[in-house]
Amino acid sequence: MSRFDHRKATVKLQLKDAAGNLLANKEVKADQTNHKFLFGCGAFDVQGVVMPEDLKFPGFDEERMKKMKEASKKRMEKFVKLFNYGTIPFYWGGYERKEGQTNEKMTMDSAKWLKDHNIKVKGHPLCWHTVCADWLMDYPNDVILDKQLKRIHREVGNFKGLVDMWDVINEVVIMPVFDKYDNAITRICKEYGRFKLVKEVFEAAKAENPGATLLINDFNTSQAYEILVEGLLEMGVPITAIGIQSHQHQGYWGKEKLLQVLERFSHFGVPIHFTENTLISGDIMPAYIEDLNDWQVDEWPSTPEGLERQANEISEMYTELFANPLVEAITTWDLTDGKWLKAPSGVLTEDAEEKPAFKALMKLVHGDWETHETLKADDNGIIELTGFKGEYELNVDGKATKITIDAGMNDVMQVVI
Amino acid sequence: MSRFDHRKATVKLQLKDAAGNLLANKEVKADQTNHKFLFGCGAFDVQGVVMPEDLKFPGFDEERMKKMKEASKKRMEKFVKLFNYGTIPFYWGGYERKEGQTNEKMTMDSAKWLKDHNIKVKGHPLCWHTVCADWLMDYPNDVILDKQLKRIHREVGNFKGLVDMWDVINEVVIMPVFDKYDNAITRICKEYGRFKLVKEVFEAAKAENPGATLLINDFNTSQAYEILVEGLLEMGVPITAIGIQSHQHQGYWGKEKLLQVLERFSHFGVPIHFTENTLISGDIMPAYIEDLNDWQVDEWPSTPEGLERQANEISEMYTELFANPLVEAITTWDLTDGKWLKAPSGVLTEDAEEKPAFKALMKLVHGDWETHETLKADDNGIIELTGFKGEYELNVDGKATKITIDAGMNDVMQVVI
């Protein structure tokens, strides 16, 4: 028994060649090529890769644009080496700066690039009070709600097949009492209430893509969020996964808190995604800061101890989460350092160098938790393969084929190589 | 304008004698005899007043029983002097120690005694994981839920007319995760979920007494409780008042926290009751104690400073609550010192002496907030009376009658004296 047995399955395969001959007593190499589990990361850099050659940013000359594109490419090369899952931005305020003028083309290209690289894509988020479109505030609340729902229909509908996972609504616990600045979404959440708003946005997303994975997502991991989710599930809101943020700029939660949070959200039996995980490789932010956004620094460098600490913490955290049967996904929020709050929160440096945390994850994701076996088929060409769930390549005599191992099966699966 | 204008109303009365003659130009004395607002207190001592003469308690001889009865009488005399509203116990574990053997008779006598003394009665509570009946644990969860609902039908039905206010369910936020000891109610709350259980118990109470005031009640005043209430209201659970406990054994909340809590629960527009208020007149309990029940002391005396502090705090708190239009009731939990946790938490000493807090409340409830006016009727026998809402006695020429002032009226009300 290992803590990860539930992540594995055993299958029996009977191997034949194209002519139907049993591949009896052959040596079979089975190499896992992808995980069922979603090892994710913020994939915002993909936009730099797919952006049109003639795109101009204010203050960026041609040389600088070229450098940005090259940097993005280098980063995304590392991304696909480690991760199989990426989050791309749909912040309304950025996606539709002026009403009716969306960033759909480049976002679609981003999603396609990821799909072409075998990366599953999640859109983030469809409804949130932050980075919200200012022009919405020109409308009365009933119109804002209507536009919010239409926006969900538009994005979920247009991206169906490319993006089938969505952070439908973000940070609902604080949403109606958020008081940093006026915004359209806080207004409607205050007027209609959290439950009604969540219900409506989920039903809009579900109607457009019934098979999609639909998440609620929050940084609040207290009983308040638990009770919110409990009520929503009781009302039949089609939440397919509970999203938990874990931005640990103020220090690693530690195993105890991590297990407490898992316990708090496990009793629903609904899959859990760690949607936004941050562990930093520099000095940690003081505990007295309540809103992480209030911590504005000129620079926030990594330290030698910090780099080692980040790698250790990320290993422990991923191990605990991978061991919990309800957890289906973990997303490291920042691919590279120096993004949000300038934090040293990436698994890569700004120059796309692999940090110790990157190597630690490589060791787990593509080492300890990845199956590579050499087996010998029996007289009937049958092999029994036990491995981590996901996609595999089978090789016999220089010929290859692909299979997927998910749940275990008693029947013998026929495989033609 | 005063902060309490919403507690007052103005009525025009045309006064006539029994023969129908206008009482023109007469001097009219208007004396408020009761408040619409509920100034309440735990009325557990009423049981000592109504208990049968032949009742025996283990270890109590006749003399001691007699003393207890006398002490209870003395206490309840003070009760009716100050309060117009009382909470009586329906803890299932005490009310029905053995299945089928209830304390209905004495509880009914208690409620009648209070009603006879013009005291409105609330039953507390119908569903709670603490002081729960142990014999329930012999049953499977579906039977426990069934017995819980039947219990509600029985009590609410049998006491209808005497008890039309109920703490239907107590401390739901912690209920399913309460882990101090096993009990039947935590079991069913864990199995069926908070929302379903609350919905069922409220619907049972509502079905039995549709006009009753039905409260949910909690010591948790955080966002978790707010979101619970929000979801329940969204589901149409017939909550007619939100109950907030405020046991301040660890020190007075202060005005800031009080206003925050009011703000948090005001946006529903549902009436708020402060159901269990405690302010103590001795040293306060250390802040590190998480469950108040963990603070076990041999004695907990009042101090001179504590007595003054308690009086000041109770005055400030009642003033803030009376000023909030949504607050309909405040209950001081302990009538006398030395009850729960032995705390000096009463408005009376154990010997029923009036503490400074009692006198401070008398000054507000029967002083500043009570209307006594002498008016002169005009040529048509009409007076215009503005006063705190409640019951009044009008006196003209040694004759008296009673009226009730609630909402203001434009029409002239005819009053026969």
Image (cartoon, coloured by chain):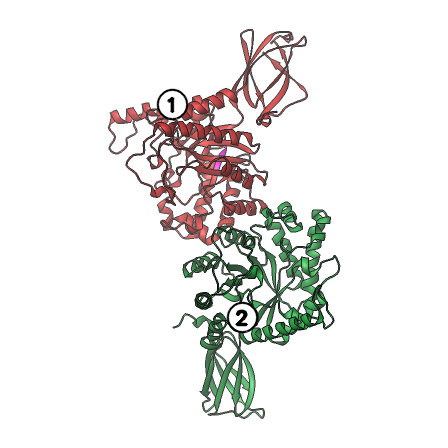
Chain colours: A red, B green
Residue type pointed to by label 2: Leu
**Mark carried by residue B348:** 2
Residue at position x 63%, y 53% in the image: B129
Q: Quadrant of the N terminus of chain B?
A: bottom left
Q: Is residue B121 above or below residue A203?
A: below
Q: Is residue A27 above or below residue B373?
A: above
Camera-nearest residue between A346 and A112: A346
Q: Which residues are magenta?
A: A162-166
Residue type pointed to by label 1: Glu
Q: Main secondary structure of the magenta part?
A: loop
Camera-nearest residue between A30 and A253: A253
Q: In the displayed structure, does residue B177 sit left or right of residue B5?
A: right
Camera-nearest residue between A214 and B289: B289
Disc 2, SS: loop
Q: In the displayed structure, does residue A402 sit left or right of residue A55?
A: right
Position in image of residue B52 (x %, y %): 72, 71
Residue at position x 53%, y 56% in the image: B219
Q: In this orientation, does residue B161 appear? A: no
Position in image of residue A83 (x %, y %): 45, 25
Position in image of residue A151 (x %, y %): 44, 41
Which chain is disc 2 placed on? Answer: B
